[in-house]
Image (cartoon, grey):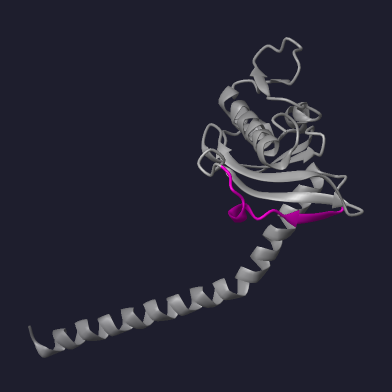
Amino acid sequence: MNKTKSDSIFNLTIRLVIITVCAGLILGLVYGITKGPIAEQELKKATEARQAVLPDAQEFKQIALDGMDYDQDKFADINEIYEGTSNGQTVGYTFAVTTKGYKPGLGLTIGMASDGKITGVMIGSHEETPGLGANATNPSFLDQFLETDGPIVIAKSPSGAENEVQALTGATITSKGVANAVNLAREFAGQYLGLGEGA
């Protein structure tokens, strides 16, 4: 290999290293600038979701799950629980749950009053099929969960039974995913928070 070719390869390598280092520094700088605002937006969104599903609450206080003795395997889908209060009195709880619908990553916020009745269900994130499972975000579906006070049953053709929810057309798996999340929150509330069934 002649000296000119060797110098050319060396120069090219140096340039690539400089470009890579500069790109890394720029990405790090952009991340540093955007990290705070993104975290603030996520916090704001989560707070608004809690307020929407438990509207009677004026303040929310996070329950420290790592300080509780509970079945962590069974309730692994529950990410966060907040106690909602009004004038110093507990009015209910909210649950952040990430479960599986047709696809993984179905994220919900569920509100439950002190009497164990569901006060609201919101879907914050999902990868469900547009026009099918994605319809789970529609109020016409989610409102069926309001005021239920026992295990939810999903039905393709509702019979009018108590705590029965009509499945989304063509999206029974997603419907069951939402119901499973609500039932999981209810079971946790009954066993560990003294609400509803199991209290």
Magenta region includes residue 77: no
Q: Which of 197 and 80 is in front in this view?
A: 197
Q: In this view, does 191 lie above or below 38?
A: above
**Residue 119 seen in the current view:** yes
- Vertical side of 113 occupied by 150: above or below: above
Residue at the image point whose x is 65% and y is 29% from the top:
179
Q: Say which quarter of the image contains residue 172.
A: top right
Q: What is the quadrant of the N terminus in the image?
A: bottom left
Of residue 199 and residue 150, the one placed in the foreground of this image is 199
Q: Nearer the viewer, residue 40 or 129?
A: 40
Estimate the x, y position of residue 133 in percent, counting from the top left.
60, 30
Quadrant of residue 145 within the rendered picture: top right
- Whether the magenta-drawn stretch holds residue 66 is answered as yes
Residue for point 32% across, 83% down: 15
Looking at the rendered image, the quarter that the C terminus falls into is top right
Residue 148 x, y percent position in the rendering: 77, 27
Left or right: where does residue 82 sit relative to residue 184?
A: right
Residue 125 appears in the figure: no
Write the start and end of the magenta stretch as one range: 58-70
> Which residue is farthest right?
87
Left or right of residue 189, residue 75 in this image: left
Residue 171 is situated, as x and y percent measured from the top left of the image, at 59, 24
